[in-house]
């Protein structure tokens, strides 16, 4: 994971901000990661510069999978699993996982969830769900789980579409 920082400093008795970001440098045919720093007198300009660097590195495909063996294998295993799902997207799957993140994640893919996970529905909403579950021949909890997961999947897909539209705007502008 590449790290980006904005650090408050004092230069010539004035407040300034130092932006530190990663950059790649070719040395003898090898790609090396180095850090660069730029100083700004305004926090807004520093933040804008940092966002530009992040966007530039994301657009240029700076993810260096070959250099991180564990990440490379993890991505390949994830793609292998998603290959069995029609119209699946790795990015949507990642956003879906992020949206369903627990407040406390534990090692080994475990997480802490509240013990009491009951929700209350309005009477008409409950009757509508109950009738739909009965007509579909499934349990009410399975119907509600399906509705919530569909909503979360649409939310994740919307985030991907938002990113794609931002990239198109950046290319036009």
Image (tube, rainbow, N blue to C red):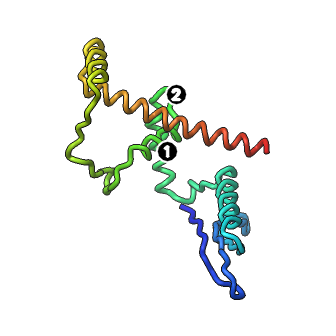
Residue positioned most to the front: 123
Quadrant housing the C terminus: top right
Query: Quick one: SS at disc 2?
Result: loop
Q: Is 172 left, or right, of 54 in this rendering?
A: right
Q: CA distance from mark 2 to mark 1?
A: 17 Å
> From the viewer's perspective, is residue 144 above or below residue 68?
above
Front in this rendered view, residue 163 or 1 = 163
Q: Residue 6: where, in percent of width, then height?
A: 61, 70
| Coordinates of residue 153 in the picture (x, y in percent) | 45, 34
Q: Residues within 10 Å of mark 1 (few under 14, many from 20)?
A: few
As drawn, the residue found furthest toward the top would be 135
Q: Earlier in the sequence, mark 2 or mark 1?
A: 1
Q: Is residue 31 above or below residue 170?
A: below
Q: Is residue 96 left or right of residue 30?
A: left
x then y, percent, for residue 62:
64, 55
Q: Residue at x 70, y 71 (%)?
A: 42
Q: On the image, numbered disc 2 is attached to which residue?
A: 87
**Callout 1: helix, strand or loop?**
helix
Q: Measured from the top left, where is residue 102 in percent x and y?
A: 34, 50
Packing grade of label 2 (10 A; few <14, some 14-19, many >=20) is: few
Q: Is residue 74 above or below residue 44?
A: above
- Image depth: mark 2 or mark 1 in front: 2
Q: Specify whether 75 is left or right of 26.
A: left
- Name the image quarter holding residue 2: bottom right
Q: Which mark is residue 76?
A: 1
Foreground of the two, 89 or 166 = 166
Q: Residue, x 42% and y 29% (percent of image)?
A: 150
Label of residue 168 in the image: none
Q: Is residue 32 visible?
A: no
Q: Residue at x 20, y 46 (%)?
A: 115
| Residue 170 showing in the rendered view | yes
């Amino acid at each position: 994971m590449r790290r980006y920082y904005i650090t408050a400093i004092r230069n010539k008795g004035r407040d300034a901000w130092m932006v530190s970001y990663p950059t790649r440098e070719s040395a003898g045919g090898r790609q090396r990661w180095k850090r660069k720093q730029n100083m700004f007198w305004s926090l807004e300009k520093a933040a804008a510069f940092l966002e530009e660097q992040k966007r530039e590195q994301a657009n240029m495909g700076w993810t260096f999978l070959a250099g991180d063996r564990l990440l490379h294998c993890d991505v390949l295993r994830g793609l292998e699993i998603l290959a069995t799902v029609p119209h699946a997207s790795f990015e949507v799957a990642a956003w879906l996982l992020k949206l369903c993140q627990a407040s406390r994640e534990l090692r080994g893919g475990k997480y802490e969830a509240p013990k009491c996970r009951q929700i209350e529905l309005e009477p008409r909403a409950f009757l509508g769900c109950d009738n739909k579950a009965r007509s579909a021949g499934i349990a009410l909890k399975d119907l509600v789980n399906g509705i919530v997961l569909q909503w979360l999947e649409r939310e994740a897909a919307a985030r991907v579409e938002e990113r794609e539209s931002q990239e198109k705007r950046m290319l036009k502008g």
